[in-house]
Image (spheres, rainbow, N blue to C red):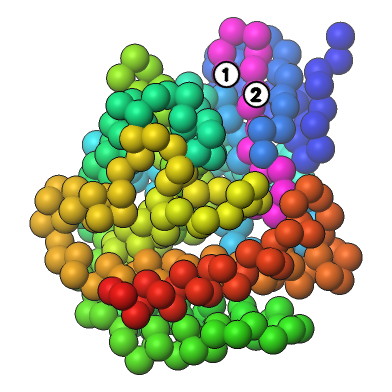
Amino acid sequence: MSAVHPPGLDPEQLRGHLDRERPGLVSGPLSARLIEGGRSNLTYAVTDGTSRWVVRRPPLGHVLATAHDMKREYRVISALHPTDVPVPAPLLLCEDESVIGSPFYVMEFVEGVPYRTAGELAALGAERTRAAVFGLVDTLVALHAVDPGAVGLGDFGRPEGFLDRQLRRWGKQLDASRNRELAGIDELHATLGRSLPDSPAPTVVHGDYRLDNVLIGGPDDRINAILDWEMSTLGDPLTDLGLLVMYSSELGLPDSPVSTTAGAPGHPSAREIVERYAAGSGRDTSAIAWYTAFAWFKLAVILEGIHYRYTLGQTVGAGFDRIGDLVPVFIEHGLTTLQEG
């Protein structure tokens, strides 16, 4: 029986490489299935029938090298693995493109569920939901407590001027996908620029920290692993918290293609999340409105980019036709967050 061969990963080629580099790791023919597809890095579950691993590679087709750097992802999980931060054990990095057609890395397979929606979370019940989200906050505190220099990540980013650079970068992204009037977006961008907070000491920043980028499992619903490190860098830790607060806020939209988990019974409020982070980390969170508004702005820009590609016929799929209607909602939330603090 021949091995299953998903796009972008030939199990036989992979097996040959693993047998050369990690003799004895694999004990039979490999089969693989794609866990995630799309514009982001591709993730495959691989098994020899006894053991399981996960392989990550860049998307198929032409991509910006920096946005999908396997070496960076592998480096950050390797550095964090000996710490209290839960990440999968790294096994191997391969930069030789001849093996599967691109650089890739292999890590251990971790059990757990990525809860994507309030509906999925509701199945846990109110008490477990509350504990799981507080666990998410506590795990973020643990990540931001890691001394980057002590784990070999002292040069993992450029923290000086981080917020200013982020704001400029997302402003450029917005300009690249402008093909309609968006009331309030320039006002939101300008107001954020006029009121940049002073960043605390830099930490490792995940960059996309939310409930569906962690695996929760076991009898105590603990966080078994943080996944998707492709946006990670050294920078302002409160950007991670602002994004988490945004994803924990009610959108007020039924059947939204973008999910926040806030509607699940027992879900802690934004205020409780911020208070728990402040208590655990000792950081001043008084400027959290800015960071949360920045998260709303960033998501508005990302969604407008998807909408723009959809109008050009470059993106197809369920829900894409409704993305454009969401953008004004995100802008409005951003402006309101800044005004109300």
Q: Number of labelled discs? A: 2
Front residue of 26/174: it is 174
User: Taking the image as drawn, is residue 220 in sight?
Assistant: yes
**Element under disc 1:** strand
Q: CA distance from mark 1 to mark 2?
A: 6 Å
Q: Please give the label number shown on residue 46.
A: 2
CB within 8 Å, label 1 to label 2: yes
On the image, which quarter does residue 85 sit in? top left
The reply to whether the magenta stretch includes residue 50 is yes
Q: Horizontal and vertical percent for residue 127?
A: 30, 26
State whether residue 315 is above or below residue 192.
Answer: above
Front residue of 95/65: it is 65
Q: Horizontal and vertical percent for residue 254?
A: 61, 49
Q: Please give the label number shown on residue 250.
A: none
**Element under disc 2:** strand
Region in magenta: 37-52
State whether residue 33 is above or below residue 302.
Answer: above
* Three-letter code for the amino acid on which mark 2 is drawn: Val
Front residue of 62/175: it is 175
Front residue of 311/330: it is 330
Pointer 1 or 2: first along the chain: 2
Q: Horizontal and vertical percent for residue 30?
A: 71, 18
The reply to whether the magenta stretch includes residue 218 is no
Q: Which residue is mark 1?
A: 52
